[in-house]
């Protein structure tokens, strides 16, 4: 037999040139498998082992419906207008004015559309750009976990550090700001919050926001509030951080058109708040992108002016959430109706009566997918939790009920322990 070996594959000459922030000379060589890739692999295994079994996918983190027909009609008209063909740069006034009207109607917050609002190509780029406005090497961004990591990733890109604030049940899933050491506060430039919170579904109280404002002034840091799920508030009236007295002095709020308006993929949002911070964001943005397509901005402005759209979307997801909570409770899960978002965050089971054991939420997720065909997302950042999303595809309430019945059947058979 031949003893020939595979020829050694040499790295490209630029392998050593990759920036340390993305792995340096080891970029592309990591064997770590990320959480969502593990979920994809488990789904493939489940489909291969049970090709005739429907996957019940509660892991999808995006709206299941198209944008409202009226919004799509505005888009269809605006794409044919020659004045919309050029670069938008830092946005068109029509969208900023609609955002200002939206903030006034819903939260009684007065904003100057010319100086206190700017659009973003979805909220994700805003969290990438805001650290560029403030973070120097050695500075700190305070971030809740579990949570959306983008602002923290870019903080590290700029040589800063991230201080993690765990969201725990005993603190009503609010960060314990009193636990932050003084030396961290001395270095802190940003505090990133998100309420209604993804993935816990919890709301912030007015008293908590008041404490944040007072602390920001005392410790001298900037607050960035992620309000992506604000229109999916189930418990009472939606609350904007900017409603808090003094909030406009310490930070900004970032809004998204995705969750509340079914405009997933349209990539539209806005940053609102202190004019100097909005100006800094706009300067960084001006050197990062050339603005969202003007027709998209005008269609989004029409959406912001139609409060019936988010009302319908909220009603749908609240109905679905109530059904899911009832089913999971019947199947032994410890859960309750969240204050908002389309996510249900519940402690992961510890095992099954038949002898399966789950050391982590990730283990429970793999079992659910491969053995039961039920897809969830695991969180092991601050305890072992599963995230169920009610953004599954169902064309009617009857389809929702059928899916819930099948979910109950499969989960009941597993006989989970906790």
Image (spheres, rainbow, N blue to C red):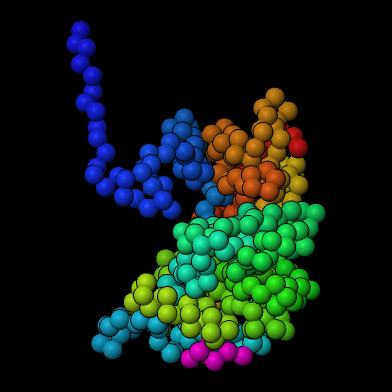
Q: Main secondary structure of the magenta part?
A: loop
Residue 137: percent from left, percent from top: 51, 62
Residue 174 left/right relative to 136 = right
Residue 337 in sight here: no
Which residue corresponds to the image point at 54% horizontal and 86% vertical from the top-left? Answer: 275
Tell me the magenta residue range.
110-116
Does the magenta segment cover residue 115? yes
The one of 262 and 111 positioned closer to us in this rendering: 111
Does the magenta segment cover residue 298? no
In the depicted structure, whether residue 359 falls above or below residue 290: above
Residue 385 left/right relative to 2 = right
Residue 59 in sight here: yes
Which residue corresponds to the image point at 72% horizontal and 42% vertical from the top-left? Answer: 331
Residue 198: percent from left, percent from top: 62, 60
In the picture, the quarter occupied by the N terminus is top left
Which residue corresponds to the image point at 46% horizontal and 59% vertical from the top-left? Answer: 157
Residue 124 left/right relative to 12 = right
In the picture, the quarter occupied by the C terminus is top right
Q: Quadrant of residue 172?
A: bottom right
Please give the count of numbered marks on the rendered protein.
0
Which residue corresponds to the image point at 76% horizontal and 58% vertical from the top-left? Answer: 179
The one of 102 and 194 positioned closer to us in this rendering: 194
Residue 301 left/right relative to 349 = left
Residue 274: percent from left, percent from top: 58, 84
The one of 208 and 7 positioned closer to us in this rendering: 7
In the depicted structure, whether residue 95 falls above or below residue 391: below
């Amino acid at each position: 037999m031949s003893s020939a070996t595979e020829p050694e594959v040499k790295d490209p000459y630029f392998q050593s040139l990759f920036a340390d922030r993305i792995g340096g000379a080891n970029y592309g060589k990591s064997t770590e498998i990320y959480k969502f890739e593990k979920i994809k692999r488990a789904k493939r295994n489940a489909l291969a082992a049970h090709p005739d079994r429907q996957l019940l996918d509660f892991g999808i983190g995006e709206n299941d419906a198209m944008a409202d027909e009226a919004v799509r009609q505005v888009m269809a008209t605006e794409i044919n207008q020659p004045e919309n063909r050029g670069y938008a740069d830092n946005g068109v006034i029509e969208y900023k004015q609609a955002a200002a009207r939206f903030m006034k109607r819903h939260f009684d917050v007065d904003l100057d559309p010319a100086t206190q609002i700017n659009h973003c190509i979805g909220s994700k780029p805003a969290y990438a750009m805001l650290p560029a406005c403030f973070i120097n090497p050695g500075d700190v961004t305070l971030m809740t976990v579990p949570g959306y990591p983008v602002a923290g990733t870019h903080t590290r890109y700029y040589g800063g550090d991230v201080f993690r604030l765990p969201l725990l049940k005993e603190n009503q899933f609010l960060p314990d700001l009193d636990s932050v050491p003084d030396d961290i506060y001395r270095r802190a430039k940003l505090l990133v919050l998100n309420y209604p919170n993804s993935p816990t579904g919890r709301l912030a109280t007015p008293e908590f926001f008041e404490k944040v404002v007072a602390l920001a002034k005392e410790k001298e840091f900037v607050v960035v509030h992620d309000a992506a799920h604000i229109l999916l508030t189930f418990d009472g009236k939606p609350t904007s951080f900017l409603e808090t007295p003094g909030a406009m002095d310490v930070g900004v709020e970032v809004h998204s058109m995705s969750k509340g308006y079914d405009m997933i993929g349209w990539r539209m949002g806005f940053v609102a708040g202190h004019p100097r911070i909005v100006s800094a964001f706009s300067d960084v943005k001006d050197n990062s992108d050339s603005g969202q397509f003007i027709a998209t901005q005008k269609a989004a402005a029409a959406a912001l002016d139609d409060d019936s759209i988010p009302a319908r979307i909220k009603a749908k997801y609240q109905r679905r959430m109530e059904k899911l909570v009832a089913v999971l409770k019947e199947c032994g899960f410890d859960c309750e109706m969240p204050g908002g978002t389309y996510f249900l965050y519940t402690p992961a089971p510890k095992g099954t009566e038949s002898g399966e054991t789950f050391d982590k939420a990730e283990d429970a997720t793999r079992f659910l997918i491969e053995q039961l065909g039920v897809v969830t997302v695991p969180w092991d950042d601050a305890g072992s939790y599963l995230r169920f999303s009610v953004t599954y595809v169902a064309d009617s309430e009857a389809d929702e009920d059928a899916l819930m019945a099948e979910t109950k059947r499969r989960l009941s058979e597993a006989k989970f322990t906790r």
